Image (cartoon, grey):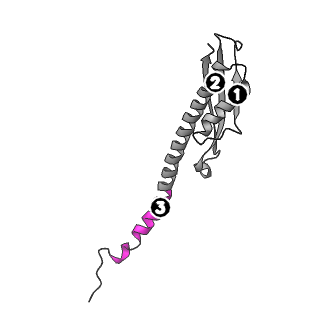
């Protein structure tokens, strides 16, 4: 009885070494793709939240706290917490009828790949502007 192998004795550990070399690279790529998806979701959510705040502001242009609350509620519906973010409400030409209202949201996004990058935080800034009827 003989034990036969498809690999010669000198190649027995080759697969393990190849895996040890490639696994970190594959993990970096996988987590990078995951971060990119999370970043895209956060950017869309922040944009939608700014739009919702501006939409609320077209009906109640003098209610800055209501605009901020509407912005936070819209982001919270998509699992983004804006409690520590900066939300600016501005009326460049005044907050009257026929004039515009602008809502700007600044959100700090933390990357999973922060262990590899020098600065794991990205600042997302999105704004929306609408006319007050």
Along the horizontal axis of the image, is 11 left or right of 100? left
For the residues bearing labels 1 and 3, Cβ distance under 8 angstroms: no
For the residues bearing labels 1 and 2, Cβ distance under 8 angstroms: yes
Residue 45 is situated, as x and y percent measured from the top left of the image, at 57, 35
Q: Quadrant of the C terminus?
A: top right
Q: Which residue is mark 3?
A: 21
Placement of 97 over or under 55, stated as above or below: above
Q: Quadrant of residue 125?
A: top right
Q: Earlier in the sequence, mark 2 or mark 3?
A: 3
Q: Which residue is mark 1?
A: 66
**Magenta span includes 94:** no
Residue 55 is situated, as x and y percent measured from the top left of the image, at 60, 23
- Distance CA(mark 1)–CA(mark 2): 8 Å
Placement of 89 over or under 117, stated as above or below: above
Q: Which residues are magenta?
A: 5-24
Tell me the residue at 66%/18% (across/down): 101
Q: Earlier in the sequence, mark 1 or mark 2?
A: 2
**How many residues crowd around disc 1 within 10 Å: few (fewer than 14), some, or many (20 or more)?**
some
Q: Which residue is mark 2?
A: 56
| Between 84 and 110, the one nearer to me in the picture | 84
What residue occupies the far front of the structure in this picture? Answer: 59
- Distance CA(mark 1)–CA(mark 3): 54 Å
């Amino acid at each position: 009885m003989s034990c036969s192998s498809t690999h010669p004795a000198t190649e027995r550990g080759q697969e393990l070494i190849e895996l040890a070399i490639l696994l970190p690279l594959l993990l970096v790529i996988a987590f990078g793709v995951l971060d990119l998806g999370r970043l895209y979701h956060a950017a869309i959510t922040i944009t939608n939240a700014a739009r919702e705040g501006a939409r609320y502001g077209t009906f109640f242009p003098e209610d800055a706290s209501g605009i901020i609350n509407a912005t936070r509620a819209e982001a919270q519906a998509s699992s983004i917490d804006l409690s520590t973010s900066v939300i600016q409400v501005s009326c460049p030409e005044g907050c009257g009828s026929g004039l515009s209202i602008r809502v700007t949201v600044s959100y700090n996004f933390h990357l999973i790949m922060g262990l590899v990058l020098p600065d794991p935080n990205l600042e997302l800034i999105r704004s929306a502007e609408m006319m007050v009827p």
